[in-house]
Image (cartoon, rainbow, N blue to C red):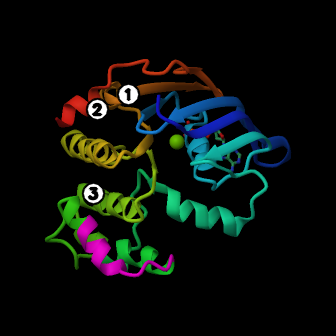
Amino acid sequence: MTKAVIELENVSLTLGEGASSVHVLKGIDLTVRQGEIAGIVGPSGSGKSTLLMVLAGLERVDDGRVTMAGMTLNGKSEDEIAAFRGRNIGIVFQSFHLIPNMTALENVAVPLELAGHPEPFRVAEQELVAVGLGERLTHYPGELSGGEQQRVAIARALAPSPPILIADEPTGNLDQATGRQIADLLFSKAAERGMTLVLVTHDPALAARCSRRIAMRSGRIETGETEDSGPALAATAIA
Ligand code: ADP
Ligand code: MG
């Protein structure tokens, strides 16, 4: 068995103030091991995105313990968490979140540069070529299709070589064929690099290809605590 790279113990989180506060996560226990591809499914409002925010260290928990890639995030300063995230966690969003006035190359290179990488533009170009965008380096997001924009976002997430990749409905804004290509890309990059991938999806076909499914309902995990609860189709699909 590979080592645990994500460990949540009894994690609880309430968001909002006063009468409008919501108990979003209610005692989540979750272990994800290196190389797993975990698909989080569940109805809208069940807490999936919030759980990913907790994994990314973008949301602090009220109770419980969060350990990512061997570092316990509880009690760490914002700066420590930001530095940790930059090196260890790649994030892909449904709506791409690219910077509109930067080219594809700059969108990938500038975060690397800010993190003090010695060769940000060389690595950024390499990553964009690896996601099939070698011909689009100087295009701006507005000049790219949705699928191409998501490829830039994936290149940006992969560029620091993080051990963990998290993706919140990465195919949610794409047509079915494009979504399928983006899923193939994510699965193949994760497998190639031995990364752990946690993704939220509403697409049953995509969930079925994960090595493991985690079902959320009303802030709790319903199933998926058994290891290898589903067929590891992700690996075979890219073979
Ligand atoms: P999902 O991604 O599964 O659709 P979310 O994690 O986005 O669910 O949200 C879970 C619940 O938390 C929802 O009921 C949502 O309205 C609530 N919520 C999320 N963020 C906040 C916030 N900042 N303040 C109050 N409630 C919030
Ligand atoms: Mg969501």
Mark 1 neighbour class, 10 Å CA radius: few under 14, some 14 to 19, many 20 or more: many
Mark 2 neighbour class, 10 Å CA radius: few under 14, some 14 to 19, many 20 or more: many
Q: Which residues are magenta?
A: 115-127
Judge by depth and name the residue closer to the eye, 127 or 1: 1
**Dot 2 amino acid type:** Ala
Dot placed on the residue nearer the N-terminal end, 3 or 2: 3
Give the prevailing secondary structure in the magenta stretch. helix
User: Percent x, y for residue 162?
Assistant: 45, 57
User: Percent x, y for residue 33?
Assistant: 50, 35
Q: Quadrant of residue 130?
A: bottom left
Asked whether mark 2 and ligand 2 are closer than 8 Å, the reply comes as no
Task: Please tell me the numbered disc located at residue 63.
Answer: none
Residue 120 is a magenta residue? yes
Residue 102 appears in the picture as rendered: no
What's the CA distance linking mark 2 and mark 1?
A: 7 Å
User: Percent x, y for residue 146?
Assistant: 27, 57
Q: Read off the residue under disc 1.
A: 211
Q: Is residue 150 left or right of residue 58?
A: left
Residue 149 is a magenta residue? no
**Dot 1 amino acid type:** Ser
Q: Is residue 220 above or below residue 20?
A: above
| x 36%, y 43%: residue | 172
Q: Read off the residue under disc 2.
A: 234
Q: Is residue 36 left or right of residue 128?
A: right
